[in-house]
Amino acid sequence: MSPVDRYYVTTAIAYANNKPGLHTLYEVIGADVIARWHRMKGDETRFLTGTDEHSVNIAQKAAELGESTRAFVDEKVALFRAAEAALLISPDRFIRTSDPDHIRSAQEMVRRAYANGDIYLGKYEGWYCPAEGFKAGSDVIETPEGTRCPNHPTVALEWLSEQNWFFRLSAYQERLEKHFAEHPDFAQPDYRRNEMLGFIRGGLEDFSVSRSGATWGIPFPIMPDGSSSQRADGTWDPAAGTIYVWYDALINYVTGAGFPDDQAAFAKWWPADLHIVGKDIARFHTIYWPAMLWSAGMDAPRHVWIHGFLLAQGERMSKSLGNFLDPLDVVATLGADGARYVTLREVAFDRDTDVSWDSFTRRYNADLANDFGNLLNRSISMANRYFGGVRPSVGPDAGLASAWTETLAGYQDRLERCLLSDALCTLWEFVGAANRLVEAEQPWTLAKAMKAGDAGAETRLKAVLGDLVEACRLIALAAAPFIPAAASRAFAQLGYEYPYGADGNGGPALLDELHWGAHAGEAGQLATPEPLFPRLEAESTTPAEG
RNA sequence: GGCUGGGUAGCUCAGUGGCAGAGCAAGCGGCUCAUAAUCGCUAGGUCGUUGGUUCAAAUCCAACCCCAGCUACCA
């Protein structure tokens, strides 16, 4: 038998301290497109996204608001889920680091590393802000009064040392270098890979994996003497501390694959095919994470794609600066499909990109309303007008057919290399070719000749419109991972049943459907055309400033 | 500071020795099937600066100016 390929793609989990901005959901949209592409191709696909909920900051913020930490993160998670639903994000699981199976998973990963001799007791030293906790060396400022943390400039920092557990990252330097050498596409794009490789070559230090004192976190499962920190009644000895950051957050990827409860599922889904992460956490995903997995006897993920940030007038979008776009505003203005398309078309997936309402609406109007939406509209209108809506079939000698073959190859290549903006650019060149065909053939002129009794003109007209309708089918279907709802609506207008589910599962193998003329000869009736992407007027394009 | 990448049209970018390019935005024209859509044409650039190599430099070399990324434990 030819086994169905399976594909496991993840995003980074988002810090659940606020409502999500488009700059946060950007990678989720991208991952969703890749997941849908694989589902439609017929790969058995798993798409994991979720939230990171353990941190001193979150517990503190909840306390300030007089809420339980649990209630606080539940609220934030609901905001994420609502925004993702609005963007038609289709995770197979939305994981939370507070999920019980994740807690078991993180603890088991710690036990495995310990059993492998990679976790040892050490001393963590650093600046400590009494109002906040340990601060990284890069995160403190020098003031005339002394060293301070930027969040609490009036509070004197203390130099503290704390007994913590450490992970022996230094033991994996050679293996990491070898892995990078043998798998050049493990970390991409190339310039990020080179940065990571440079970091490895500079020498690796061990990092701490536990914190004492913190209570909002996963209990560290091991006592200093090596015994379990779990008591007879099932509770955990707080003296053991909690698991710190990366042995919590990164572990979500194996939890999402079934670890540790469902070994069969884990064997099926691990290693992940693709982690999509922001450049700020590239090092943890391409260096810490493989070492942690190897320590547990597991394989490294196959690919890590490192994307850039959204910028507003050159500045990184962030919640603290307040210069971010609310995904719900973008969806309200552009629609879910428009928001997805425009975000991934305007922002290169491999580097930072400046975005604005102006660039978004211009792109929406140019690509979606004018180029593709109007192509669909004019094609269907003419077929309705000249042939009563009977869907015409492709012609015998369509020049678009060979152009399509080339387009599809380029589109697929870019999409599968995570060059999402380039993929759309390639596909839209074909949209332009179809629009030019209309001008070249002038169906309205052929229609006049047909009316005058020219049988040749009628044949020609039918073929031209058949080619245009076929072009629309192919474009809509190929673009469906980006614009799933619009693709379905386009199919309805074209008189085709849309065979895929709301998440892209369940239909025929996409690449079979993407052949020119795959449905030639099938009878069908076109519907009344409705603008697929209504054009935006300038006045309506600047909602929610600031 | 060190290492890496970049500075090309109003905007976003492609272009690694041979007549400066694309898309969008702008202007003009054509068409009328269409969402004032579409198609064609035009305009617009001392290719960061200065010097050098070369018959020839956006491209190679040197110096300098500016921007970004990385330079370890943030979620």
Image (spheres, coloured by chain):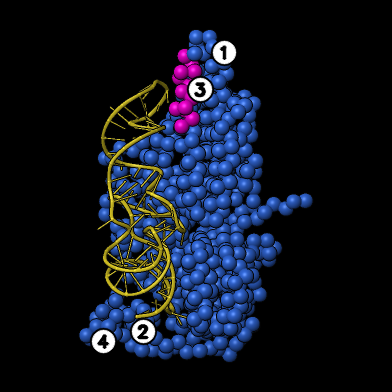
Chain colours: A blue, B yellow
Q: What crowding class fits label 1: few (fewer than 14 Cα within 10 Å), some (14-19), or many (20 or more)?
A: few
Which element type, helix, strand or loop, lies under badge 1?
helix
Q: Callout 3: few (<14), some (14-19), or many (20+) C-alpha neighbours within 10 Å?
A: many
Point 52% across, 79% down: residue: A201
Which dot, 2 or 1, sits closer to the camera? 1
Badges 2 and 1: C-beta atoms under 8 Å apart? no
Q: CA distance from mark 2 to mark 3?
A: 72 Å
Q: Which label number is shown at residue A455?
A: 1
From the viewer's side, name the closer residue of A250 and A170: A170
Which badge, 2 or 3, is on the more N-terminal residue?
Answer: 2
Magenta stretch encompasses residue A145: no
Give a yes or no on whether discs 4 and 1 share a subunit. yes
Q: Is residue A442 magenta?
A: yes
Residue A5 to residue A195: above or below: above
Q: Which residue is mark 2?
A: A128
Amino acid found under the numbered disc labelled 4: Gly
Q: Residues within 10 Å of mark 4 (few under 14, many from 20)?
A: few
Q: Chain of mark 1?
A: A
Of mark 2 and mark 1, the one earlier in the sequence is 2
Q: Given this view, does label 3 or label 4 mark the residue nearer the observer?
A: 3
Q: Bounds of the magenta span?
A: A436-448
Instruction: Look at mark 3 in the image and give the residue it sits on.
Output: A383
Circle nearer the N terminus (4, 2): 2
Are the residues under badges 2 and 1 in a single subunit? yes
Identified by mark 3, the residue type is Ala
| Element carrying mark 2 | strand
Q: Which residue matches tag 4?
A: A146
The amino acid beneath tag 2 is Tyr
Whole-number angstrom distance, CA of label 2 to CA of label 1: 87 Å
